[in-house]
Image (tube, coloured by chain):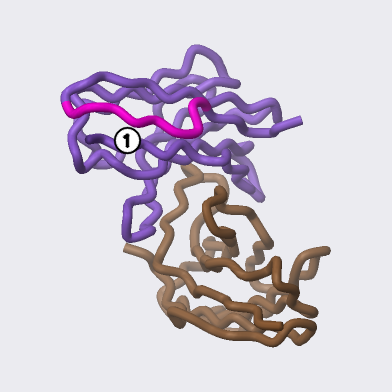
Amino acid sequence: DAKTTQPPSMDCAEGRAANLPCNHSTISGNEYVYWYRQIHSQGPQYIIHGLKNNETNEMASLIITEDRKSSTLILPHATLRDTAVYYCIVTTPSNTGKLIFGQGTTLQVKP
Amino acid sequence: DTAVSQTPKYLVTQMGNDKSIKCEQNLGHDTMYWYKQDSKKFLKIMFSYNNKELIINETVPNRFSPKSPDKAHLNLHINSLELGDSAVYFCASSQLTSPNEQFFGPGTRLTVL
């Protein structure tokens, strides 16, 4: 079973920031938070990951709370092409690499 | 250049047949995976190979047999296909060290009639 809880769906206006929350209250000290997304009919795509510090890359920012029990993925300027299912996954990166996908959040970006 | 490729993209077959799906990665990764996405869109890990050695083998019927001839290839052979095997199968690869970012292929949509 997935160790994370996400809202099933969210809407966002094009050009605005999309903030996707994730709860992972049972996260262990050596587990990272990963975010992937799946655009319709395509394979999942890695977005970002973090341990305890906030992270930013060209796609998104990841904000992890101090107690590490929750995190937020931020797409700063959402476009229609960001419409996808977003998955928050908690795992240890150098174990078997196993990703356990939950239901994710379906983000609909609207014009 | 496609990083992770799968063939075929679509596969339609009759119950009871045997079929194979091929996967190749040109990223130089040491680990490859097979995932299954069913009609309800749940993505589930099936197998993983690290340097041609099986490291993940989830509760999958033994009709499914992965084969890794080398680090760049991981094929999935399915015997005696059943209706419930209809799904999209995704191959992925990664380097099994941090950050272990996984790169996914485009998927193979298998339909069993």
Say which element carries label 1. Answer: strand
**In the rendered image of this protein, which colour is used for chain A?**
brown
Q: Quadrant of residue A59?
A: bottom right
Q: Please give the name of the residue rendered at 60% of the width and 21% of the height, measured from the top-left corner.
A: B72
Return the residue at label 1: B57
Provide residue A96's location: percent of width, then percent of height. 47, 42
* Number of numbered callouts drawn: 1
Considering only vertical position in the picture, is B57 above or below A51?
A: above
Q: Chain of mark 1?
A: B
For the residue pair B94 and B4, the one nearer the viewer reads as: B4
Is residue B79 shown left or right of residue A56? left
Quadrant containing the N terminus of chain B is: top right
Q: Quadrant of residue B113?
A: top left
Considering only vertical position in the picture, is A28 above or below B2?
A: below
Q: Which chain is purple?
A: B
**Magenta includes A101?**
no
For the residue pair B31 and B66, the one nearer the viewer reads as: B66
Is residue A85 shown left or right of residue B46? right
Provide residue A110's location: percent of width, then percent of height. 66, 82
Provide residue A19's location: percent of width, then percent of height. 65, 84
Q: Residue furthest top?
A: B69
For the residue pair A96 and B105, the one nearer the viewer reads as: B105
Q: Please give the name of the residue rendered at 76% of the width and 86% of the height, measured from the top-left corner.
A: A16
Task: Give the magenta part as a residue range.
Answer: B7-15
